[in-house]
Image: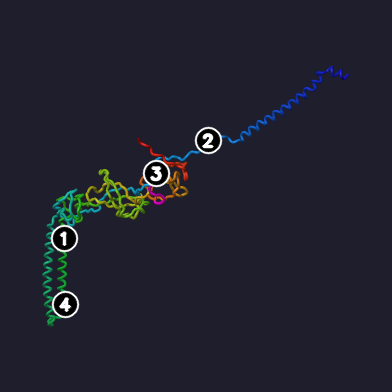
Amino acid sequence: MSVITQSRHPDRVRGRLKPWLIGLLIVFLAAAGGTGVWIAAQGDATAAAKPAVDKSAKAPAGPLELAAADVATVELRALSRRLPLSGSLTPLVQATVKSRVSGDVLEMRVREGQAVQKGEVLARIDIRNLGAQLDAQRASLDKARADLALARVNRDTNAKMLEQKFISQNAYDSAQSAYDAAAATVKVAEAQARVAQIGLDDAVVRAPISGIVSQRMAQPGEKVSPDAPLLSIVDLSRLELEAPAPASEIPSVKLGQTARFKVGGYGDRQFAATVERINPATDAGTRSIKLYLSVDNADGALRGGMFAQGELVLDQSVPSPTVPTSAIRSDAGVTYVLVVDGGKLVRRTVTLGLKTDDASFVEVREGLSVGTQVLSAKIDALNDGSAVSLAKPAVVN
């Protein structure tokens, strides 16, 4: 009966087995899929671990070619350090002629701009009163001399009488005293006569220096008193340039240093000046110090009051090796240049000196010789040991 039962109900048996089979298939497929994923992941990791090959990589480049503008040659140059100066020109010697006596101006012989020589007569003052005074002093002198002569005779006579005991010693002493007083009176009269003569001579006004009349302050017919100004004379053969300088530059300024300057109206003509004096104190407002430079103006080209602009040479070197300032490099306080030597750059330490006014060249006191080629261009990729080559000059057909 059991057989018959099974044969009679085959669908019921299949219905019980179908879910089990389906579950088994699912587990099997899941296991197979996980293995495939793991294999794929392992393949990707292995591929990532392999080094990448850059098919675009090129062989290492050769020496860097330097253009002619990148390299400078050490040359001899004379460098100097200069201080800009500007100021007004004033005559070094000038004088104001004054009247030494009182009286009317009888004559003025010169005018502004006229050249005069030392001792030349410039003006005359009325001397009638002075002449009368001189005559009176001369008369007094003559009387004093006459009194002296009489006193001398009395003294000599009393001396003989004293020897013969005809007079006392007191009488002789009185005669001697009268003689001494007469001699002193003569000296006083002589001095007064000289003063009157000087006054008479001063009535003729003469030039105290050689130069050019810059101002006339009295006219004929005017009455002047002692110390009244009559004329102003300037000597243009030597002028003085007064110019301020920063106090920080004064330690470099020395007497005898030479400056060159120009004056408006003279084009490119340059004039020379020499430091003569240095003011010992700074100016309260600008904190600068005045320099006084003498100017030789023998040809009279310059005039007082003109404005000058120039430069004072503070320091000057003999012709020395120089390089462009752009070639100088610094590392940790050490100054050096890169020298082109044997197809590569070699670091060389240098000691520097003066610079040009525009700071384009600098003096090399130690470390380089004339003719050496140095790198003057600022190329960051180049340093000590870099391989370089110099570009060949272009051939001009």
Q: Residues within 10 Å of mark 2 (few under 14, many from 20)?
A: few
Q: How crowded is mark 4: few (under 14 residues within 10 Å), some or many (20 or more)?
A: some
- Is 118 on the left-hand or right-hand side of 381? left
The label shown at residue 57 is 2
- Is 73 on the left-hand or right-hand side of 306? right
Residue at position x 51%, y 36% from top? 58
Residue at position x 65%, y 30% from top? 40
Which residue is disc 3 drawn over? 72
Residues marked 3 and 2 touching at CB (< 8 Å): no
- SS category of the residue bearing label 1: helix
Which residue is disc 4 drawn over? 173
Q: Which of marks 1 and 3 is nearer the N terminus?
A: 3
Which residue is disc 1 drawn over? 198
Q: Earlier in the sequence, mark 3 or mark 2?
A: 2
- Is 25 on the left-hand or right-hand side of 351? right
Which residues, given as a range, are shown in magenta? Answer: 365-376
- SS category of the residue bearing label 2: loop
